[in-house]
Image (cartoon, rainbow, N blue to C red):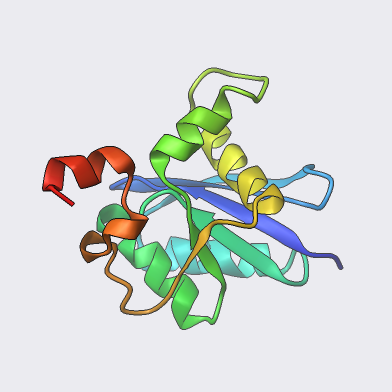
Amino acid sequence: MAAIWAGIDAGKTHHHCVVIDESGRRLLSRRVANDEPELTELLADVLALGDGVTWAIDLADGGAALAIAILLNQDQPVHYISGRAVHRASEGYRGEGKTDAKDAAVIADQLRVRRDLHPLRGGDDRRHRPDLQPAGHRARRGH
């Protein structure tokens, strides 16, 4: 089995996950509830698809906290990509308009091709890290 990349478009009550291989081919696309049993099942299903899964998510707290905690507790590498970066990148992808599935696919593909995404670690509180906030957020907070 080969390395694969999983992108999660996070929401308050549901997330959408898309998994791709090294050529960008979709291996899985699934909407899951933001609860531990469904997220744990998703993790197991993704791990069964390939070796060396790397994850990315577009939120670093709030509705994504449970998904991030489950992944980190299983020693999964998780990276953060801002919603703004996903929006900008999605303009270069064909297909449906803005949907959770498309955003998750963009997140997975950006993770596959970029090397500048920030890894998340247990206890990482991004709200107090101005270097990891979107530029507009820093300006509003006076950073």
* 73 versus 116 height, above or below: below
Side of 7 relative to 65 (left or right): right
> In the image, is residue 131 above or below residue 43?
above
Instruction: Give me the residue at 66% from left, 44% from top.
Output: 109
Residue at 65 percent across and 62 percent down: it is 46
Whether 135 is drawn above or below 61: the answer is: above
Looking at the picture, tell me which residue is in the foreground, 139 or 32.
Answer: 139
Residue 60 in sight in this render? no
Expressed as whole percent of the image width and height from the top left, the position of residue 105 reads 61, 40
Q: Residue sitting at 57 percent across and 50 percent down? A: 7
Q: Is residue 71 left or right of residue 3?
A: left
Q: How many marks?
A: 0
Residue 40 visible within the image: yes
Relative to 90, say whether 76 is above or below: below
Q: Quadrant of the N terminus?
A: bottom right
Q: Position of residue 122 (x, y in %)?
A: 37, 79
Residue 33 or residue 136, whichever sits in front: 136
